[in-house]
Image (spheres, rainbow, N blue to C red):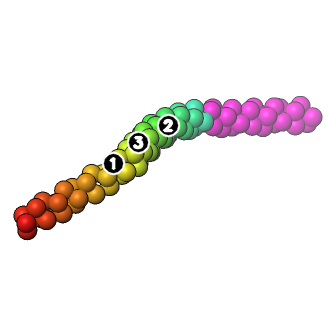
Amino acid sequence: MRLCYIYHMNTAFDVLVIVLGSLLGIFLILSIIAVSLVLRLLKSLRQIATKGEQLVDSAEELGETLRRNAGAAGMLRMLLKFMATINAKGKKD
């Protein structure tokens, strides 16, 4: 009778090993797929961040250009108004 109990215990142990081994294999495959998808996502996010950084750099350059030329544009506008005033007074005489 004792032999029968040991045999059943080995069978239960074998079944447990097979079930746990199968689950571990499935988990390993799913983990590899998940890591692959996360790496793809990170690559896409890195590309988006790079493009966003380029966009911000372009906006900064545009802002600097406008700031530098704002004084020149104001001076040009004032000069043109002055010349128009002189021409208007010259035509009155």
Residue 71's place in the image compared with 5, above or below, is below
In front: label 3 or label 2 = 3
In front: label 1 or label 3 = 1
Give residue 46's mark: 2
Find disc 3 in the rendering and name its residue: 61
Furthest toward the right, the residue is: 2
In magenta, the rendered stretch is 1-29
- Residue 22: in magenta span: yes
Image spot of residue 88 (x, y percent): 12, 64
| Disc with the residue nearer the chain's start (3 vs 2) | 2
In the image: residue 35, left or right of residue 15 = left
Furthest toward the bottom, the residue is: 92
Image spot of residue 92 (x, y percent): 8, 68
As shown in the figure, which amino acid type bears the numbered disc 1?
A: Ala
Q: Within 10 angstroms of label 1, few (less than 14), some, or many (20 or more) residues? A: few
| Disc with the residue nearer the chain's start (1 vs 3) | 3
Between the C-alphas of marks 1 and 2, the distance is 39 Å
Q: Nearer the viewer, residue 41 or 79?
A: 79
Image spot of residue 90 (x, y percent): 10, 61
As shown in the figure, which amino acid type bears the numbered disc 3?
A: Glu
Q: Nearer the viewer, residue 29 or 86?
A: 86
Residue 25's place in the image compared with 65, above or below, is above
Residue shown at the point (28%, 57%) measured from the top left: 78
Task: Tell me the quadrant of the picture where the C terminus can be found.
Answer: bottom left
